[in-house]
């Protein structure tokens, strides 16, 4: 649909194409996350989800660079100017890739799962669990906060650093690349079958490898991205303070993001830029941890609860609108107060689960020893 939309420069058709893309990727998220959570024990679900989300983040890391190169450079006008026509061939390429992936998946024999109980769940019984209701709200805030920050980074860098889009897209890749680093580290840290000594070695190796991958992707010098090493070290420290407990780790990461957002709002220049880009690496484990904590202990209501939590990704469509309204009135920098409230909710949810689901985390910690 992007081809005719670009050919006729018809904006409603662009919106229709984006809507269909959104539907498809949402169904993929719902299916893949629920499926991965079933591919093993409940104790290691957070670790598995972090691993799959890490590859999700790899896609969002290379997308700004790859898309920017195709649209702003390779298929731009001969005189270097940009028009909507430049999006036609790239989107046809992406469509072909998605069709190929779909064909490959259709040929792979995947394990199938059936409910262990034949009891039919009537009504909305899952909503009787307070931690599930809180988890749905936390997921709404998380996806809303993550998308809002990512959506405004380019505008923020244009406003504070005077960067053009060609430069800003590389820094946007750092934001999503941080999520990739953190999720790989989270997959290791939250795996209770690995000793602490091995975790440290594996996490160090994974961080170094993924950082090199990001460095090779983005069109930035080592000096320009070296500040990210500080966030990686801080991420290490946060994981070890969290002691592989999903709720505690979630609260720590949310608290760090609140601090980074406040720094983004009150500082200027490179300090503000570093602060907003560092948020990505601490977003890393939030989706998987919120998801698994929210559906913990639901029993026969697990499937229903899982659907409710995934529905909460609607926050990614709503929260950026409110930040945009504030940005129009008070500027992009001050609009980050909206994500601050989102991460405060997540912090409180993590603390709530630490207190009321403590027995779950205690069992997980013991299994790790």
Image (cartoon, grey):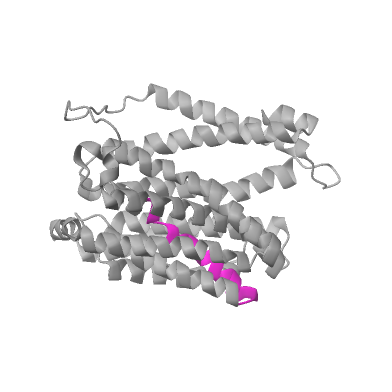
Where in the figure is residue 123, as x and y percent of width and height? 29, 32
Q: Is residue 218 visible?
A: no
Based on the picture, tell me whether residue 282 belongs to the magenta stretch.
Answer: yes
- Which of the 4 image quadrants contains residue 74? top right
Give the side of residue 304 with respect to residue 340, left or right.
Answer: left
Q: Nearer the viewer, residue 167 or 197?
A: 167
Q: Is residue 297 left or right of residue 160?
A: left
Taking the spot 68% from the left edge, 31% from the top edge, the residue there is 2
Q: Position of residue 326 (x, y in %)?
A: 64, 61
Towards the viewer: 136 or 107: 136
In this rendering, does residue 239 appear at all?
A: yes
**Residue drawn at 31 percent across, 27 percent down:** 110
Main SS, magenta residues: helix
Extent of the magenta region:
267-287
When the figure is inspected, residue 140 is found, relative to residue 22, above or below; the finding is below
Please identify the quarter of the rendering in which residue 333 is found. Answer: bottom right
Q: In the rendering, at what x and y percent does residue 332 appear?
A: 65, 64
Residue 88 in the image: x percent, y percent?
71, 33
Specify the quadrant that holds the C terminus: bottom left
Determine if the magenta segment contains residue 275: yes
Could you say which quadrant of the image residue 151 lies in? bottom right
> In this orientation, which residue lies closer to the viewer: 240 or 320?
320
Residue depicted at 28% across the width and 51% down the height: 130
Q: Is 41 located above or below residue 235 in the figure?
A: above
Q: In which quarter of the image is the N terminus?
A: top right
Is the residue 107 above or below the residue 24 in the image? above
């Amino acid at each position: 649909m992007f081809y005719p939309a670009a050919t006729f420069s018809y904006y409603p058709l662009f919106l229709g194409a984006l809507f269909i893309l959104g539907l498809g990727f949402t169904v993929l998220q719902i299916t893949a996350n629920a499926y991965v959570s079933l591919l093993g024990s409940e104790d290691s679900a957070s670790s598995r989800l972090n691993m799959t989300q890490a590859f999700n983040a790899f896609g969002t890391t290379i997308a700004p660079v790859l898309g920017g190169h195709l649209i702003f450079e390779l298929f731009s006008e001969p005189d270097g100017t940009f028009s909507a026509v430049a999006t036609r061939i790239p989107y046809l390429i992406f469509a072909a890739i998605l069709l190929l992936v779909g064909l490959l998946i259709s040929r792979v024999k995947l394990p199938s799962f059936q409910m262990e109980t034949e009891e039919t769940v009537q009504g909305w019984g899952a909503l009787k669990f307070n931690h599930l209701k809180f988890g749905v709200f936390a997921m709404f805030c998380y996806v809303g906060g993550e998308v809002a920050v990512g959506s405004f980074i380019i505008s923020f860098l244009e406003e504070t650093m005077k960067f053009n889009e060609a430069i800003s897209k590389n820094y946007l890749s750092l934001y999503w690349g941080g999520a990739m680093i953190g999720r790989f580290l989270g997959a290791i840290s939250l795996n209770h079958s690995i000793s602490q000594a091995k975790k440290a070695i594996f996490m160090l190796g994974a961080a170094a490898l993924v950082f090199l991958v990001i460095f090779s992707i983005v069109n930035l010098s080592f000096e320009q991205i070296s500040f990210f090493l500080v966030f990686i070290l801080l991420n290490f420290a946060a994981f070890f303070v969290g002691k592989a407990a999903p709720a505690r780790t979630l609260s720590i990461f949310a608290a760090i993001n609140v601090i980074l957002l406040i720094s983004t709002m009150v500082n200027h220049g490179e300090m503000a830029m570093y602060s907003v880009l560092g948020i990505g690496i601490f977003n890393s484990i939030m989706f998987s941890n919120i998801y698994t904590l929210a559906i913990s202990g639901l029993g026969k209501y697990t499937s229903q609860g899982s659907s409710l939590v995934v529905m909460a990704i609607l926050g990614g469509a709503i929260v950026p609108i409110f930040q945009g309204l504030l940005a129009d009135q008070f500027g992009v920098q001050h609009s980050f107060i909206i994500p601050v409230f989102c991460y405060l909710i997540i912090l409180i949810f993590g603390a709530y689960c630490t207190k009321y689901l403590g027995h779950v985390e205690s069992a997980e910690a013991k299994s790790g020893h």
